[in-house]
Amino acid sequence: MQTALPHDPRGRNGHSANKVQNDYALAVGGALFEEIPKAVWAAIAVSALSCGGDQIEEAAQRVAQEWKIWHEAGIVPQAPGRFARQVNAAKSATI
């Protein structure tokens, strides 16, 4: 595993990540990224993670799991919040 230096703007695994940007946000482009409302980003994410809405009942769990995975991989620095951790814990308890 690659470890970033404290002054290195690139996180683990070579991903660029800070509180407001990451490689994925940069791929969309600054102007478009800033223009899209948070609710639209949520709709895009839920659609993508729930097979176009066909499995929408699993949306919260899938979003929470992706957030955990991306944080652990160093793609996003923001750790999952309390509710996301509870969703992930509930899913793990049923496996």
Image (cartoon, helix red, strand yellow):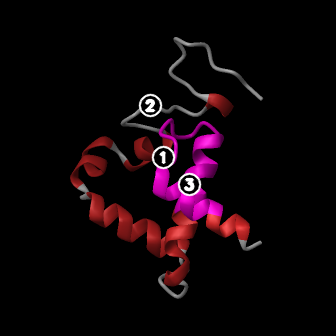
Residue 3 coordinates in the image, percent (x, y) = 69, 21
> What's the magenta region?
64-89
Mark 1 and mark 3 in contact (Cβ < 8 Å)?
A: no
Please report the residue visible at 60 percent of the width from the left and 36 percent of the height from the top. Answer: 74
Measured as percent of width and height from the top left, residue 87 is found at 56, 64
8 vs 42: above or below: above
User: Which residue occupies 37% across, 65% down?
Assistant: 42
Pointer 3: residues within 10 angstroms few (<14), some, or many (20+)? Answer: some
Q: In which quarter of the image is the C terminus?
A: bottom right
> The N terminus appears in which quarter of the rendering?
top right
Q: Circle 3 sits on which residue?
A: 85
Residue beneath label 2, please? 18
**C-alpha span from label 3 to label 1:** 23 Å
Mark 2 secondary-structure assignment: loop
Q: Which amino acid does label 3 sit on?
A: Arg
70 in the magenta segment: yes
Tell me which numbered mark, 3 or 2, is placed earlier along the sequence: 2
Residue carrying label 1: 24
Q: Is residue 6 left or right of residue 93?
A: left
Q: Given the image, on which type of amino acid does mark 2 rest?
A: Asn
Element at label 1: helix
- Look at the picture and state if 53 lies above or below 15: below
For label 1, count other residues whose C-alpha is less than 10 Å away and answer few (under 14), some (14-19) or many (20+): some
Residue 92 located left or right of residue 29: right
Quadrant assignment, res 41? bottom left
Query: Which comes sooner in the sequence, label 1 or label 2?
Result: 2
